[in-house]
Amino acid sequence: MRMLLKACMDTEKANEAVRNGTLDKLVHQVAQQLKPEAAYFTAENGRRTAFMVFDMQDSSDMPMISEPFFQDLGADITYTPVMNMDDVERGLSRLG
């Protein structure tokens, strides 16, 4: 299922990760694992935030994906099922 991962990172932990070079490594590690179709990075409410759209094969993958963000960056994580335009069209075609 296509999912949107949102990771809002704790500022102090992310600052330290930038200083010691682990933020870049963590982001690349997660990207290699997820192979996202899109990845965006911004500041939201004053916190570094990553958005990644990827295909989640099984919900049991969530701990493996989330833990590096939780443990290393004190991040708040959300997962949201999302659709692209093809998915919307397919879904709408199934209506009455």
Image (cartoon, rainbow, N blue to C red):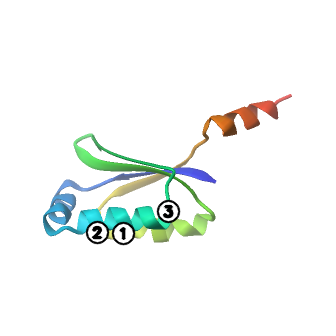
| Label 3 or label 1, whichever comes before in sequence order | 3
The residue that label 1 is drawn on is 68
Secondary structure under the numbered disc 1 in the rendered image: helix
Is residue 69 at least partly visible in the picture? no
The residue that label 3 is drawn on is 34
Identified at 51% across, 65% down, the residue is 62
Q: Nearer the viewer, mark 3 or mark 1?
A: 3
CA gap, disc 3 to disc 1?
A: 13 Å
50 to the left or right of 19: right
CA gap, disc 3 to disc 2?
A: 18 Å
Given the current orientation, which residue lies at the most extreme top position? Answer: 96
| Label 3 or label 2, whichever comes before in sequence order | 3
Identify which amino acid the numbered label 1 is placed on: Pro
Question: Would you call the spot at circle 2 few (<14 residues within 10 Å), some (14-19), or many (20 or more)?
Answer: some
Residue 9 screen position, x and y as percent: 28, 55
Residue 17 screen position, x and y as percent: 20, 65
